[in-house]
């Protein structure tokens, strides 16, 4: 075992998987930018206070944050999520509203590592600040849906809920609190602790012992104001108009204190319940104000890259892209020709690779096979003297009966147009 390895919950993403990650972000960027979202690139570090504004009821903030005091005495945290950073950026730069942005990057949470759960993990997401329109909620939810479709995922379920207006939510939390306190002895010890922090989170409990008490709990729908009810109706009507199927899940509460109105989650049908949340989001108010900005509503989501790729593996879609090059140059004359030819091909837009260290013909041909290249270009001293090169197809399309696709000696000067023709 080497002396140094990645620390728990941290990973190296190597080729070809890294190419898949890059394409994932590329597909997401396409979906977001086609809808008028621009990318925000924010720092990995923020003042700890930025995340503390997310509220004391979330584990992400209270237990899982990587924080430290820097050399200037500032209390800094590695970001555990990006909504707070985007809101901090909004307050700092005051862009025109609605401000529609997308993001990607690594988040850090000191969690217990397991399949689909890491200490450094990547997300993509969007946020829109400055509009309350329920059809904006629909646009946001639909973009997540469209992204899963673009990846080729079929088995994604959309869960939807509304937490009502702040007053509705407060009355509901009080009723929930009373209900759980009346059944306190029957609740799991963990849920008793959660209850003291945030009664809503008890609804998230996956413990069997809590299930009957959770099932009998008051329902948020009975607490909606007229306005909250109308907002929720409009969101459902919008999703239906777009043909996006959803299930209302009254237990879907998001952790943050700022969530109100719409909440939603995308679940992967092939994953088990510990990591089937592919992503989620909702509407939030008050976060911008708590960061020192003007009262500004927000709505957004974050999707986990790792879990979404696990779901892609399960469904056999969105495989890692091929890293094979078009052409592998085999040069037994010292390597200068390989240097010239690979440079010429790359400049013309063909991908090409070569061997180094003046290996034997046999060893270079092996490397050419391993590279996955469609063609080998071979130069020995005979070819060099004659001003020719040999082009040999390496994939299955050679037909020995007709000789089509077979090896061919061609003029060195004709190499580029020849390869462009056979590769097109
Ligand atoms: P959250 O910011 O907690 O709402 O998480 C949004 C999404 O990020 C989740 O649905 C997961 O797909 C992903 N996610 C959250 N925490 C982790 C983690 N520790 N490891 C991998 N993915 C995560």
Image (cartoon, rainbow, N blue to C red):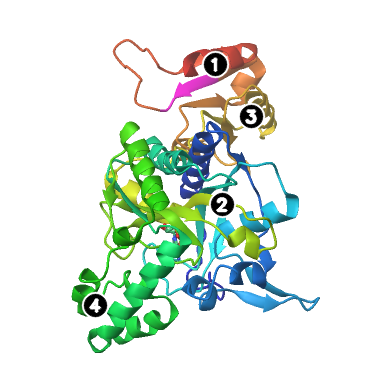
Location of residue 152 with respect to 291 vertically, above or below: above
Judged from this view, the residue extending furthest toward the left is 212
- Between marks 2 and 1, how big is the CA–CA gap? 54 Å
Q: CA distance from mark 2 to mark 3?
A: 54 Å
**Mark 2 or mark 3: which comes first in sequence?**
2
Residue at the image point whose x is 48% and y is 16% from the top: 424
Neighbours of disc 3 within 10 Å: few (<14), some (14-19), many (20+):
many
| Cα gap from disc 1 to disc 4, whole angstroms | 66 Å
Which one is in front, 232 or 36?
Answer: 232
Image spot of residue 382 (x, y percent)? 60, 21
Residue extent of the magenta highlight: 390-394
Total numbered labels placed on residues in the image:
4
Q: Position of residue 154 (x, y in %)?
A: 28, 40
Q: Which residue is mark 4?
A: 210
User: Is ligand 1 less than 8 Å from the beta carbon at label 4?
Assistant: no
Residue at image position (32%, 10%) is 402
Tag in front: 3 or 1? 1
Which mark identifies residue 420? Answer: 1
Numbered disc in front, either 1 or 4: 4
Q: Which of marks 4 and 3 precedes in the sequence?
A: 4
Task: Report the residue at 54% width, 13% height from top.
Answer: 418
- What's the mark number on residue 342? 3
How far apart marks 3 and 1 lie (CA) works out to 14 Å
Mark 1 or 4 closer to N-term? 4
Residue located beneath label 2 in the image = 297
Work out whether residue 98 or residue 281 is closer to the camera in this orientation and state it.
98
Secondary structure beneath dot 4 equals helix
Q: What is the distance, in whole Å, between disc 3 and disc 4 at their CAs?
A: 65 Å
Indicate the quadrant of ligand 1 in the picture.
bottom left
Say which of marks 2 and 1 sits in front.
2
* Mark 2 element type: loop
Report whether residue 283 is seen: yes
């Amino acid at each position: 075992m080497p002396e140094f390895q990645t620390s728990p919950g941290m990973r190296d993403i190597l080729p070809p998987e890294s190419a898949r990650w890059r394409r994932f972000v590329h597909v997401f960027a396409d979906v977001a930018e086609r809808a008028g979202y621009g990318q925000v690139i924010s720092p990995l570090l923020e003042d700890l206070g930025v995340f503390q504004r997310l509220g004391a009821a979330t584990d992400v903030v209270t237990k899982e944050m990587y924080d430290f005091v820097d050399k200037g005495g500032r209390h800094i945290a590695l970001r555990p999520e990006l909504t707070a950073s985007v809101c901090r950026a909004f307050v700092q730069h005051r862009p025109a509203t609605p401000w529609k942005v997308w993001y990607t990057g690594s988040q850090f949470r000191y969690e217990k590592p397991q399949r689909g759960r890491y200490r450094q993990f990547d997300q993509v997401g969007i946020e829109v600040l400055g509009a309350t329109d329920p059809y904006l909620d629909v646009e946001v939810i639909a973009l997540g849906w469209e992204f899963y479709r673009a990846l080729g995922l079929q088995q994604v379920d959309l869960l939807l809920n509304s937490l009502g207006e702040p007053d509705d939510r407060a009355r509901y939390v009080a009723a929930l609190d009373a209900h759980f306190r009346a059944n306190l002895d029957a609740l799991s010890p963990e849920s008793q602790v959660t209850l003291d922090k945030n009664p809503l989170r008890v609804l998230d409990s996956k413990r069997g012992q809590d299930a009957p008490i959770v099932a009998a709990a008051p329902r948020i729908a009975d607490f909606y104001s007229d306005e909250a009810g109308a907002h929720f109706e409009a969101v459902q009507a919008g999703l239906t108009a777009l043909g996006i199927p959803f299930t209302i899940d009254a237990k879907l509460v998001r952790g943050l204190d700022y969530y109100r109105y719409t909440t939603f989650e995308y679940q992967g049908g092939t994953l088990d319940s510990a990591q089937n949340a592919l992503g989620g989001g909702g509407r939030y108010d008050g976060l911008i104000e708590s960061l020192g900005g003007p009262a500004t509503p927000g709505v957004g989501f974050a999707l986990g890259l790792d879990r979404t790729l696990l779901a892609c593996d399960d469904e056999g879609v969105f495989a890692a892209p091929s890293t094979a090059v078009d052409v592998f140059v085999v040069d037994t004359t010292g390597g200068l020709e390989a240097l010239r030819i690979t440079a010429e091909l790359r400049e013309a837009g063909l991908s090409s690779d070569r061997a180094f260290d003046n290996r034997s013909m046999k060893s270079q041909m092996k490397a050419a096979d391993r590279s996955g290249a469609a063609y080998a270009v071979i130069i020995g001293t005979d070819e060099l003297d004659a001003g020719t090169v040999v082009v040999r197809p390496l994939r299955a399309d050679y037909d020995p009966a007709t000789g089509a696709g077979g090896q061919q000696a061609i003029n060195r000067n004709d190499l580029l147009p020849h390869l462009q023709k056979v590769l097109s």
